[in-house]
Image (cartoon, rainbow, N blue to C red):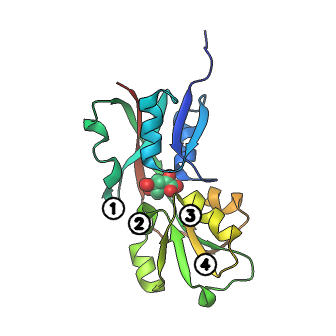
Amino acid sequence: MTGPAEVAAFLGGPGSFSEEARERFVPDATPLPCHNFAEVRQAVIDGRAAVGLLPVRNSAIGTIAENADLADDPRVAIERQEALPIELHLWTREGIGRKELKAVSSHPAALAQCSTYLGLLRLPTIWAESTGEAAAEVARSADPIAAIAGERAGRATGLIMLDSSVQDGIGNETIFAIFRRA
Ligand SMILES: O=C(O)C(=O)C[C@]1(C(=O)O)C=C[C@@H](O)C=C1
């Protein structure tokens, strides 16, 4: 027997990797997109969401600092952990060339996964709430800026890919913890 769909909290922004993780790992749940990791955890603790998804570790950068204490938080219990492949691209609006770019926006964890590429690009970086939100901000902006985001986020916001697969190393992946209230 199937009951009413459970609510699942995750980091939103159109096409964020957390959104993809929610669809893959908790496919039957009703989505509750949140603005940041603290909000995701709080939604589960408050009971607004039955389940939460948070990235805890990435193959290139290690522990996702903000979620490092999730396993030790007595208010929640990790049910399982799942790996999501992460491929990052540089996106901007049609008509903007690489040479015109003034800054690159993304979630700090995604920026950190592209340190070699960004080192060569030598542009200021802007922190966004998620890769999906970075892509949405670039789409809305009048400035010559770009976003580091995945395929889903770039396509969802109608952006143009300037450079593909700009993350460090090969086999980049992020481990998501799927957790409930303890
Ligand atoms: O910004 C997103 O799309 C997220 O879901 C966050 C996040 C993270 O913080 O690790 C998830 C997967 C990738 O490692 C990059 C960013």
Q: Residue at x 41, y 61 (%)?
A: 109
Which of 7 and 1 lies nearest the eye of the viewer?
Answer: 7
Q: What residue type is labelled 3?
A: Ala
Disc 1/disc 2 C-alpha distance (Å) = 6 Å
Q: Which of marks 4 and 3 is in front?
A: 4
Q: Residues within 10 Å of mark 2 (few under 14, many from 20)?
A: many
Mark 2 CB in 8 Å range of ligand 1?
A: yes
Q: Which amino acid does label 2 sit on?
A: Gln
Q: Which residue is drawn at 42% across and 39% down?
A: 41
User: Badge 4 is on which residue?
Assistant: 145
Which numbered marker is on residue 149? 3
Mark 1–mark 2 CB contact (< 8 Å) = yes
Which secondary structure, mark 3? strand
On screen, residue 140 versus residue 42, left or right, reads: right
Q: Which amino acid does label 4 sit on?
A: Ile
Whether 4 is drawn above or below 45: the answer is: above
Q: Residues within 10 Å of mark 3 (few under 14, many from 20)?
A: many
Which numbered marker is on residue 113? 2
Q: Earlier in the sequence, mark 1 or mark 2?
A: 1
User: Badge 1 is on which residue?
Assistant: 61
Mark 3 CB in 8 Å range of ligand 1?
A: yes
Mark 1 CB in 8 Å range of ligand 1?
A: yes
On screen, residue 137 versus residue 75, left or right, reads: right
Q: Residue 138's image quarter?
A: bottom right
On screen, residue 111 versus residue 32, left or right, reads: left
Which of 52 and 115 lies nearest the eye of the viewer?
Answer: 52
Q: What residue type is labelled 1?
A: Ile
Q: Which of marks 2 and 3 is nearer the N terminus?
A: 2
Please identify the residue farthest to the bottom as the structure is shown: 99
Disc 4/disc 3 C-alpha distance (Å) = 13 Å
Which secondary structure, mark 1? loop
